[in-house]
Image (spheres, rainbow, N blue to C red):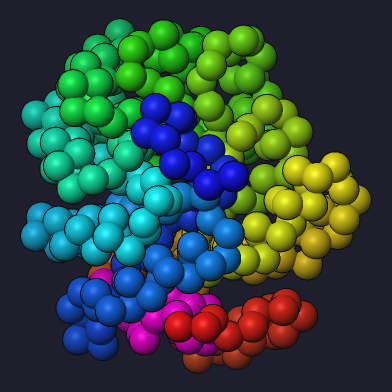
Amino acid sequence: MRLLMQNVAIRGLVPVLATPFTETLDLDRGSLRRLVEFQARSGADGVAIFGMASEAFTLTTSEREAILTDVVAAAGPMPVVAGVGATAIAPALEQLRQLADGGARAAMVLPPFMVKPGPVQLVDFYATLAAEAVRLGVSIMVQDAPGATGVAMTPELIVALSDIDGVDSVKVEAPPTLPKMCAVAAALGDRPMAMLGGQNAQFVLDEYACGAVGTMPACEFTDLLAATLAAWNSGDRAGARESFAHLLPLIVWGLQSGPAWAIHKEVLVRRGVISSAAVRAPAQPIPARMAELLTEVLAPLPLTPASV
């Protein structure tokens, strides 16, 4: 089901949007609108911006505002999750207020990571943000991403965060994600904290089997993953695994450090969703030989051109 109520935790298939740029590296707002429309047609339950796959580290404040405005407008009833990646409480609060003013439903919050916080500091950080989020009418999703931040969160710490009013979900992407997801699920018990997976949905079916209620991959194969998850949710586990096996090579390709952002965009260009695969430094374009190999990876997949 599509998410229509603000007081329901984010769940389901929530792709993290790429940020389309023109060949001159300006924000391509027309391509961004088409990208959101593609997610809606493909069966997404929501969309996320300013995540790992969004090149958020390259965006100016005014670009973030424009992206939020455009995505919320194009998403219609789909909830929009917006990332908060500031490394201290004051700028994190500023980003939280901006996304709430812009119409985002939830804030996906990285822990502060420039100065590595201890468990007590992490609880204080999220509690401060959550208090403001409750006032603003948005929810907090904890982003457990030690590969990117160097900040480890134990299952016990995630339980402590789940007890904070306003914190209702966690995106678990600490590799290897499956044992961490199972450990978090066991630690949470019957607490109503929603668990979602990341890491480009590399282990999504097993994450669902361990208690996940959603996944947040990149955005170029939403239609194929939606069909796979529909089979899984209907009880056809064998069919879901067969479908997923065909998709897995593309998923793994999108996890390559450095060219990952360009890979996501190259597939979207080939599908007619966005106009350019340009990325901003320090992200890297894919070289010609990789583009040739990507063609082979895509060949077995029913990646029909998007109707845009």
Residue at the image point whose x is 15% and y is 26% from the top:
89
User: Left of 126 or right of it: where is 92?
Assistant: left
Q: In percent of the image, x 27 and y 60: which residue is there?
A: 73
Q: Nearer the viewer, residue 104 or 198?
A: 104
* Magenta portion: prevailing SS class: loop
Where residue 149 sits: x, y (%)?
36, 38
Q: Is residue 255 above or below residue 95?
A: below
Quadrant of the drawing holding the N terminus: top right
Percent coordinates x, y for residue 119 in the rendering: 35, 12
- Please tell me whether residue 30 is drawn above or below residue 125 in the rendered image: below
Q: Can residue 2 be seen in this snapshot? A: yes
Task: Tell me the quarter of the image containing the C terminus.
Answer: bottom left
Image x and y of residue 205, in percent = 73, 44
Left of 189 or right of it: where is 174?
A: left
> What count of labels does the image hold?
0
Q: Is residue 301 left or right of residue 175?
A: right
Residue 277 located within the stretch drawn in magenta: yes
Q: Is residue 54 visible?
A: no
Q: Is residue 37 magenta?
A: no
Whether residue 169 is situated above or below residue 301 in the rendered picture = above
> Residue extending furthest right?
238
Query: Which residues, given as a range, are shown in magenta?
Result: 265-280
- 264 horizontally vs 276: left or right: right
> In front here: 101 or 51?
101
Q: Residue at x 71, y 65 (%)?
A: 247
Find residue 182 and report its image quarter. top right
The residue depicted at 49 percent of the width and 55 percent of the height is 15
